[in-house]
Amino acid sequence: MWPNTNKQQTQQTGGNPPPGEDPFNRTANATAREGGTYPDPGLYPVLYVDRLQMKRSRRNEDVFIASFDIVESKVPSRPAGTQMDWVVNYRHDASPGNVKAFFLAMMNLKDEDLDADGLRFAVSEDQPCRGRLVRMQATEQTTQAGGIFTACNWTAIPDEIQNKADELRTAAGFAPF
């Protein structure tokens, strides 16, 4: 299901290649971590992946964007039937691992099954991950410097539920395709 064409790991840097390297290689070789900054804190039991993108920001930084249709939510400010984006700026050291944790959960993959070519395909115009479901728990965290961010923990959704993704999305109030 997932093309694995690059089994090499960067050992010297804990799995993370040096900054400036291709963001897909950085993600494929990262140590999976949870984290992120944009969804409101709370539990999102079912998110429907609408679109995945890797873009360059106005500051010429790599940014990963996962756009979701919210199928089920325990967060009053983000109810079922609405949409949200999870935006990860690659200027942060933890970003490749955060994105990797998302992909591992969304695709229900093992670490060694994820590679840069598969990640490139995932954000291509083909959008092969559209319709996948994933669970997210977002919690507010305080940094050592006193700042606040929202950490995201991703969990896989079983295949028997994945097979009902479009039905669940429609039941949440989204128009059928």
Image (cartoon, helix red, strand yellow):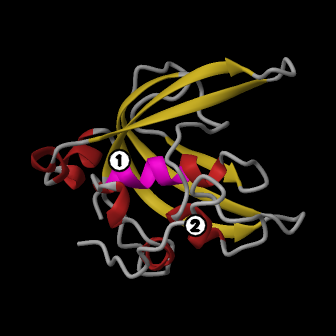
Mark 1: which secondary structure? helix
The image quarter in which residue 168 lies: top left
Most distant residue in the left direction: 160
Label 1 Cα crowd, 10 Å radius (few <14 / some 14-19 / many 20+): some
Amino acid at dot 2: Gln
Residue 101 position within the rendered picture, expressed as x and y whole percent measured from the top left: 46, 47
Label number found at residue 53: 2
* Chain-order first, disc 2 or disc 1: 2
Is residue 170 found left or right of 146 in the rendered image? left
Amino acid at dot 1: Ala
Q: CA distance from mark 2 to mark 1?
A: 17 Å
Residue on which disc 1 sits: 105
Label number found at residue 129: none
Task: From this view, report whether residue 22 is shown above or below residue 142.
Answer: below
Task: From this view, report whether residue 3 is shown above or below residue 90.
Answer: below
Does the magenta stretch mainly form a helix, a strand or a loop? helix
Q: Nearer the viewer, mark 2 or mark 1?
A: 1
> Is residue 104 rendered magenta in the image?
yes
Residue in view at x 29 percent, y 56 percent:
109
* Number of numbered markers: 2
Residue 11 position within the rendered picture, expressed as x and y whole percent measured from the top left: 57, 61
Looking at the image, can residue 24 be seen?
Answer: yes
Residue in view at x 56 percent, y 49 percent:
97
Mark 2: which secondary structure? strand
Looking at the image, can residue 175 be seen?
Answer: no
Residue in view at x 33 percent, y 41 percent:
173
Residue 114 position within the rendered picture, expressed as x and y whole percent measured from the top left: 39, 65
The image quarter in which residue 94 lies: top right
Is residue 59 found left or right of 168 in the rendered image? right
Is residue 45 found left or right of 53 in the rendered image? left
State which region is magenta: 99-106
